[in-house]
Image: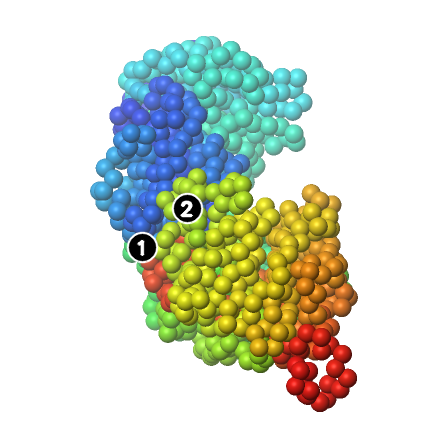
Amino acid sequence: METTLTTRRWGVSLLAALLAAAVMVPATAARAAAPTDLIISEYVEGSSFNKAVEFYNGTDAAVDLSGYELFVSFNGGTSTATFPLSGSLAAGDAYVFADEDLAAYADQTTNASLWNGDDFLALRTTDDTVVDSFGTLGLDPGTSWGTPSTANNTLRRNADVCTGDTVVDDAFDPSQEWSEFGNDTFDGLGSHAVDCEGGGGGGSVVINEFSASTTGTDVEYVELYGPADTDLSAYTVLQVEGDEGSSNFGTVIGDYAVGTTDAAGFALLDSPSPALQNGTLSLLLVRDWTGETDVTGDLGTVVDSVAVDDGDSGDQTWAQTTLDGLFDGDANTFAPGGASRIPDGADTDTADDWVRNDFDLAGIEDGDPAPGEAYNTPGAPNAWVEDTGGPGGECGDPTVTIGSVQGDGATTPVEGETVAIEGVVVGDFQYDDEGFGNLGGFHVQDAGDGDAATSDGVFVYEGSPLVDVNVGDRVHVVGEAAEYETSGGASQTQVYADSVVVCASGVDLPAATDVLVPTDLAGLDDFTGFERYEGMYVTFPQDLAILEYFNYDRFGEIVLGTERQFQPTAVYEPGSAEAVALETYNDTARITLDDGLSTQNPQVTRHPNGDPFTLDNRFRGGDLVTNTVGVIDESFGLYRIQPTGPADFTVANPRPDVPDVGGRLQVAAFNVLNYFPTLDYPTGDPLDNACGPDMNQECRGADTELEFERQEAKIVAALAELDADVVGLMEIENSPTAVETLVAALNAEVGEGTYAAISTGYLGTDAIKVGLIYKTDSVDPKGEYAILDQSVDPRFLDSKNRPVLAQTFVEHGTGADVLVAVNHLKSKGSSCSDVGDPDLPDTEGGNCDGVRTAAAEAIVDWLDSNPTKVHPGNILVTGDLNSYDKEDPIDAIVDGGYVDLIAEYQGEYAYSYVFDGQLGYLDHALANADLAEDVTGAAVWHANTDEPDLIDYDMSFKSDGQDAIYAPDEYRASDHDAVLVGMDLDRPGNRNCQDRGKGNGNGCRP
């Protein structure tokens, strides 16, 4: 066997013959200079909080990371953050810093806000010496740094980049050194390879070709490729048993020393034939092998690896890249007996680097490989025969219908097959000239196959455009049919284009197909869903109400439905069949209108009417969108309309004035959405500030002085417009001064001394608390305030709920009094299973329903005990109870003798909050029987819930263009609407007026 390996080298005549036959012998890249320091090797800017950056040590020695830090400059330098690194990074290894959501891939995590696609990153030493950078310091490029896009994408440093970019203010072009791998791609994190002279870079030496199983007597060898004329004696190739049934499973069964590369950079094993396994095996190239034979132990530094998996159940591999029977689409499904990197040294850590070797020993014996296979070339440049088969790529060549590609199910029936289609471009979403935005392709629709169950349109993905197309072009496309899977369970059929030819332009589009959203529960029976329209040109002719806009600023998404939807437990009893049915309807009877962009927080945000969203061209929840036109796609768990034109827009829910609730005295409840005078991250460092009574909790709300000014201006405007005599506040910083700070700002607007605070200091242990403010010329506090917490009633868990604040107020002029109890109960957004309260579906009251119900029962009993010691007859329970009106906590208070004033005066379909496009009121006003007689009205002021958060104060993720869409007014001051109650209070002692039909001048109502 050794003779075969050493004498069957490629001769000049054989190589010349292959070149004459136009065999593909890819050129090998020149190797870059040896690394001298760390580099940034991978960059992730994915959906939501999916952010990560990888650092690679290509030197010959371990690096102490305590001398390094990651520096981030946001939006051209409007704010910065610095993250010290820790630990040690071995030679040839990679280190991942990431958001805590990607902890599974990371060596170090943070919960701080990280970068968007337009931000600058630098890896630098702690003495501010930059060793590598990403972007241009001091410049805001918009949403991305160029092509490939740095927004919603994963980029990996090319293997020939061995030194960092230390010039921070030069022009940054990611196409020069980076390759894209798509949004939310994380499988490369934690490893990197480089193609460099010398150094310790793991990729500077690679397993370049191997052969384990061939026709006849197996010809076996392992070839390495690296720097020319280099001593590789520090390296060892290990073979690891992967067959589950073997007693050596997971054990090194062969170790093979490596010699010196030749003048071309190739080296064969110096030991006798390695006797490679024919089953599942892993080949590991290890530097400084420790002698360990357990693959899970410390082997040394694994700098490269490749494995073969023969498909037997239970087998396992331990390599960065595994080649199975389908890695190259080979129809015979057999695992390769050998494989070659094409070109030599190609190392993206994927199966795309490899081509299976010809089993019949072409290259060593006479013969030619089949198309798509490689010659056996031990010790010589790798070569292969390119597969040029498949459907024709010219206009008029045979095609299949798009319906046959889509199929009548959720996924394509021709997954992985190369198809040719021809049709008209009905949606153009190619990347623009700057290389960012849009969806990286276009939608094509053909004349149809006559089957209503199959879609006649499909998305063609190119990435960078193969050819510029326009709507109305007839195109011939050849590519692979596949499913593009995104988070949320979505899977969209796409054709990954290998070639695109424009056959004609200005072709009439097919008529847009009318698609209807179900209008009621009965309509669900006939609704067949949106899958059969995936990729097609459609219109939605109905008047569709705007339901949800939570993702509008970041992703351009607006959820539409035939009418506004309500939370099931806002209108039906939890657990009832009606609640479950309504949930099903709400989930189905909606469609998302997207913006046709893959970037987040664009400079210009698209309004449904096709124009930019501005303060003069805005929308509110409940406004109507009609004749929406576009193409249907499916991504991130939703069917979407990618718009191809403007829709008709109608203002159906104009901004309201403060509701008129009457009464001499008015009491309001207002959730001020984390009003924190203590800034959260003023310099971007998560350790900037700490909040809460013990100063050990993260602050919330504004990150910068500018954000706080914007937030405070809106809250003050809202409070001034409400003009209530008493206001209960929720979600205000739990500090001794936050309420007083807000009062000072409010009085600066409405007049000094107008309002005063009930000063409580810290309340409970949370970072937020409730508060009370009042008009000094309307009421006075009577007696002391009272607090309900766990020390008063063990049913009231103050580790979950915020303590209740109660204060009795006496009205000027009448002497009548009212006790106002302000509440903020535990939300549905987290679990209470740690206190024995099991998680529940939303149709049964949601998480922590038991905690809230016990708290509500404690509130009723506590208020019956006269906690403020001044015996008021009138009691108002108000605040954010985090419960919809049909849920158990509200039932407990109503059963305790209280009247739900919002239901009484606003009816069943009142709301103060929108979540997932469904309305209901979490913010309540409940009066005891005495007070209920004196109430003149109760209402919710819809100044917040119906407004998109694009116009709020927060600048954390918005682009500069979005930040500019701001006004210091009362709209979108919070995510909750304020509740307002009017009352004409009786004088104290007049509860027993004998004839309420006649006024007696003593406070009884006529």
Between tags 1 and 2, which lies in front? 2
Q: Nearer the viewer, residue 728 or 700?
A: 728
Give the image location of residue 849, x and y in percent: 70, 55
Q: Amino acid at mark 1?
A: Gly
| Residue, far bottom | 998
Residue 452 higher or lower than 376, as above or below: below
Give the image location of residue 763, x and y in percent: 58, 50
**Disc 1: CA contacts within 10 A as few (<14), some (14-19) or many (>=20):** some
Give the image location of residue 229, x and y in percent: 29, 15
Q: Residue at x 64, y 56 (%)?
A: 786
The quadrant in which the C terminus is found is: bottom right
Decide if residue 712 is in sight here.
Answer: yes
Q: Residue at x 47, y 25 (%)?
A: 305
Question: Does 865 sit left or right of 487 as displayed?
Answer: right
Give the image location of residue 241, x and y in percent: 58, 20
Q: Residue at x 62, y 28 (%)?
A: 315
Question: Does 582 sit left or right of 199 as displayed?
Answer: right
Residue 83 higher or lower than 997, as above or below: above
Q: Amino acid at mark 2?
A: Tyr
Q: Which mark is residue 142?
A: 1
Q: Describe the element under mark 2 as helix, strand or loop.
A: loop
Q: Nearer the viewer, residue 796 or 300?
A: 796
**Disc 2: CA contacts within 10 A as few (<14), some (14-19) or many (>=20):** many
Kindly report the distance in space between the C-alpha atoms of the residues bearing marks 1 and 2: 23 Å
Q: Nearer the viewer, residue 95 or 412?
A: 95
Q: Which residue corresponds to mark 2?
A: 681
Q: Residue at x 47, y 33 (%)?
A: 108
Question: Does 508 sit left or right of 674 as displayed?
Answer: left
